Image: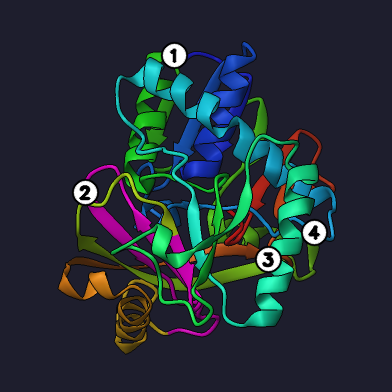
Amino acid sequence: MAMVDVTVMGAGIFGLSVAWACRARGAAVRVIDPYRPGAGSSGGTVGALSPHTPENWNAKKQFQLESLMMAGRFWAGVEAASGLASGYGRTGRLQPIADDAALALARARETTAAELWRGEAEWRVVPAAAHPDWAPLSATGYLVHDSLSARLGPRRAVESLAQALRCRGVDIVTGMAEPEGAVVWAAGHAGLAALAADLAAPVGAGVKGQSALLALDVRDLPQIFADGVHVVPHADGTVGIGSTTERAYDDPAGTDDALEAVIARAEAAVPVLRHARVIERWAGVRPRARTRAPMLGPWPGRPGHYVANGGFKIG
């Protein structure tokens, strides 16, 4: 194989995105994954890309905002190169408002969102009646509707990005291979464990999540976040439901009653889901750094090696 400038270890969504960015800047890139693209947590069903609340602003929230704002251009470029749809769509999000205090806070956030989101997206309080048949149940009769949230088909996105890389001359190697050049470790929860062992310090761990896929074609409607559950309409006519958060588990790929409880909560919050058939149940282990923030930067003590990991549940 030809010499490369950058090797990305891991073909999940983070690793493939790093590879795409490096290739776009002219680097010769190779991706190595022990299994296949999207074999880990990037092969799930939910695909919610949603913003932090527009308040108490910090560098992490700004980083995420800029990522959400550029996502449309990013995925348009990937799809143009691959010829495959990613399932990306900035379709917005609905959240129920529980009581008068939450309603007052939501209205205050209309102003801060206008300032912090620079007028490129809105956070609005709307009557639940504005979304008949799809609105989550709301004790106040009001919802938050933001226009910044987006959805992505996790598996379709991985497939599209992997094909785009191949079309740009990037080798994606499955199995074991030695890295060359600068090395970016985007190896999911196993990568966090390896980093922790190397540094003899806790840096994060894997957190199991269970989710489901429902057969319900509401592809153009906003996603919903209610009672701690994401309900995400996908471009292929399915709806992703998730997910559990399990720090302790015996079977990383097994589904159980914890997922059934998530599905029940989703059906209680969004009654139309009760008529939808569950077509898939999924489980996997997601990488969580010590905080939910992404971990991106040099590997301490290893010149030429970098880490791209974490980013747990922050879209």
- Relative image position of residue 171 (x, y in whole percent): 42, 23
- Relative image position of residue 139 (x, y in whole percent): 50, 82
**First in sequence: mark 4 vs mark 3:** 4
How would you rate the neighbour count of disc 2 (Cα within 10 Å): few for under 14, some for 14-19, many for 20 or more? few
- Relative image position of residue 279 (x, y in whole percent): 16, 64
Q: Nearer the viewer, residue 9 or 87?
A: 87
Q: Which amino acid does label 1 sit on?
A: Arg
Does 236 lie within the magenta span? yes
Q: Is residue 310 above or below residue 81?
A: below
Q: Are marks 1 and 2 in contact (CB under 8 Å)?
A: no
In the image, which residues are magenta?
224-249
Q: What residue type is labelled 2?
A: Gly
State the image quarter where residue 179 is shown: top right
Q: Name the residue under label 2.
A: 237
Nearer mark to the viewer, of 4 and 2: 4
Tell me the number on the disc at residue 106.
3
- Relative image position of residue 98 (x, y in whole percent): 57, 80
Q: What element carries label 1?
A: loop
Q: Which amino acid does label 4 sit on?
A: Glu
Left of 157 or right of it: where is 73?
A: right
Residue drawn 58% across the image and 16% down it = 24
**First in sequence: mark 4 vs mark 2:** 4
Q: Are marks 4 and 3 in contact (CB under 8 Å)?
A: no
How would you rate the neighbour count of disc 4 (Cα within 10 Å): few for under 14, some for 14-19, many for 20 or more? few
Q: Nearer the viewer, residue 260 or 181?
A: 260
Figure quadrant of the N terminus: top left
Residue drawn 70% across the image and 63% down it = 107
Q: Name the residue under label 4.
A: 55
**First in sequence: mark 1 vs mark 3:** 3
Tell me the number on the disc at residue 39.
none
Tell me the number on the disc at residue 168.
1
**Disc 2 to disc 3, how far (Cα)?**
31 Å
